[in-house]
Image (cartoon, helix red, strand yellow):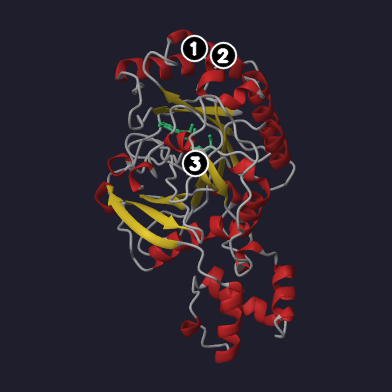
């Protein structure tokens, strides 16, 4: 399946956050999707240039050999890119000049052109807007917390999932991103950190933040020069609808250096509208990334409207798939629930959600309510604080661990559903 949905969940405030990325493409689809209309197959467009990060270690050796160089050069190039975070020939002094130029020209083409970079939260949050080779715009958000650094990345330009509360969803799907394009967002963030481009976060960690799903991460407290500890697929796009590229990116992110970036799988969160076959396929990969299911309603009647893929995969099927994911991987699943005033925040819905989750067992799931970040022109707004609190308490009464996710980045449209909207 090839669809997309594009919220970029980035934390901003009290707890973990979501960043929804909304892609405003310069070359956007000619018309917005009609309400409820799904785009499951991405439009075919020109392919981004091939990049080292698209390739397995073996494919890199073959590619280097095909250029007439000894295969071990592939390893040197990987060390430059994944370990030293370098992609300019001038810095590859262990390689003969002609070899560098050749390898870089062929295997390290520029994939992300910086458009702009906006800072919030006293510098601890940076939103970056990128132009892809064909003019499509995507966004990523880098968030520094006292004990971790999370990058929220896009997996598609636009999104085909058409969730009506999500800015990206309203724009429709332009195209799938390549593995290289997905990985480059993390490499760019890692580079910025290494060069001291993001100050230490002080006192910003009021609640659950993006990447918190990865509880038990053994990363040390972040001090001084930091590394990326967490990556969340909560930017633009439905990554499971761009499965091959997304799993390729997960492999590059988790492979130890110099083959990949060496990020712990536990620090990676795959967020999905609930593409059941994709969830099962991911479970079978043997890479224990954290799964986040964007549920937003516990009943089919409302979820059909809020998350249109629900017309294909119902609430119970999505929850069952999430539970199977837990059973297969041992990773506790997150349920994302954007709280929308008077739409999905009623006490009875909290009870229904709590019952459905508790019925499948204990300890397998936690819920992250997210205050709705209203998109421009939206008729919806966030739940009242008291209602939000009651929703949380009801879930807890059912024995379901629940943490309101913070909304870091909202002041720079770096939070849920906002990312690309302001970039047009
Ligand atoms: N396609 C993936 C990634 C979406 S972004 C998915 O649907 O899970 C991450 C989260 O942000 C999702 O749970 C999404 O529903 C949520 N989100 C999108 N727009 C939002 C908004 N305006 N306010 C709050 N959360 C939003």
- Identify the residue shown where x is 36% and y is 32%: 375
* Front-most of residues 367 and 184: 184
Left or right: residue 50 compared with residue 85:
right
Foreground: disc 2 or disc 3? 3
- Give the label on residue 299, or none: 2
Q: Where does the N terminus fall, quadrant-wise? A: top right
Q: Ligand 1 within 8 A of label 3's CB?
A: no
Q: Quick check: marks 2 and 3 in contact, CB under 8 Å?
A: no
Left or right: residue 159 compared with residue 126:
right
Mark nearer the N terminus (2 vs 3): 3
Foreground: disc 2 or disc 1? 2
Mark 3 lies on residue: 30
**Place of residue 236 in the rendered image (x, y in percent of width and height, measured from the top left):** 49, 43
414 is higher (above) or lower (below) than 294: below
User: Of all residues shown, which one is farthest toward the top?
Assistant: 348
* Front-most of residues 135 and 14: 135
- Give the label on residue 349, or none: 1
5 is higher (above) or lower (below) than 347: below
Tell me if mark 1 has few (under 14), some (14-19) or many (20+) residues whose alpha carbon lies within 10 angstroms of its own: some
Foreground: disc 3 or disc 1? 3
**Mark 1 element type:** helix
User: Of all residues shown, which one is farthest toward the front?
Assistant: 30
- Give the label on residue 265, or none: none
Mark nearer the N terminus (2 vs 1): 2
18 is higher (above) or lower (below) than 49: above
Evaluate whether residue 419 shows in this view.
no
83 is higher (above) or lower (below) than 266: below
């Amino acid at each position: 399946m090839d669809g997309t949905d594009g919220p970029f969940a980035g934390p901003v405030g009290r707890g973990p956050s979501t960043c929804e990325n909304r892609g405003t493409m310069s070359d956007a689809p000619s018309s917005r999707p009609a309400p409820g209309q799904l785009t499951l197959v991405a439009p075919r467009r020109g392919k981004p240039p091939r990049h080292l990060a698209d390739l397995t270690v073996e494919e890199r050796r073959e590619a280097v050999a095909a250029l007439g160089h000894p295969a071990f050069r592939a390893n040197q190039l990987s060390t430059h890119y994944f370990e030293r975070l370098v992609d300019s020939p001038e810095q590859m002094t262990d390689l003969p000049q002609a070899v560098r130029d050749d390898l870089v020209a062929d295997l390290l083409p520029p994939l992300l052109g910086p458009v702009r970079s906006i800072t919030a939260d006293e510098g601890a949050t940076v939103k970056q807007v990128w132009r892809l080779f064909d003019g499509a715009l995507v966004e990523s958000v880098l968030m520094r917390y006292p004990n971790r650094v999370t990058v929220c990345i896009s997996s598609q330009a636009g999104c085909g999932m058409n969730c009506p509360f999500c800015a990206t969803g309203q724009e429709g799907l332009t195209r799938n991103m390549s593995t290289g394009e997905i990985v480059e967002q993390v490499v760019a963030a890692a580079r910025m950190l290494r060069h001291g481009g993001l100050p230490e976060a002080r006192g910003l960690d009021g609640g659950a933040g993006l990447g918190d799903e990865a509880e038990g991460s053994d990363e040390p407290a972040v001090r001084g020069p930091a590394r990326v500890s967490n990556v969340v697929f909560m930017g633009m796009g439905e990554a499971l609808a761009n499965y091959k590229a997304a799993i390729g990116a997960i492999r590059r992110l988790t492979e130890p250096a110099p083959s990949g970036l060496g990020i712990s799988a536990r620090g990676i969160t795959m967020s999905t509208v609930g593409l059941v076959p994709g969830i099962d396929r991911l479970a079978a990969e043997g890479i224990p990334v954290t799964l986040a299911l964007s549920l937003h309603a516990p009943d089919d009647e409302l979820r059909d409207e809020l998350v249109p893929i629900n017309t294909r995969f119902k609430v119970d099927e999505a929850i069952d798939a999430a539970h199977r994911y837990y059973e297969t991987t041992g990773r506790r699943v997150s349920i994302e629930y954007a709280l929308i005033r008077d739409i999905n925040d009623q006490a009875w819905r909290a009870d229904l959600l709590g019952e459905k989750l508790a019925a499948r067992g204990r300890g397998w799931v936690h819920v992250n309510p997210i205050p709705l970040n209203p998109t421009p022109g939206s008729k919806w707004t966030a739940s009242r604080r008291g209602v939000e609190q009651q929703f949380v308490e009801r879930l807890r009464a059912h024995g379901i661990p629940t943490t309101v996710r913070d909304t870091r980045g909202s002041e720079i449209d770096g939070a849920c559903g906002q990312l690309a909207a302001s970039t047009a």
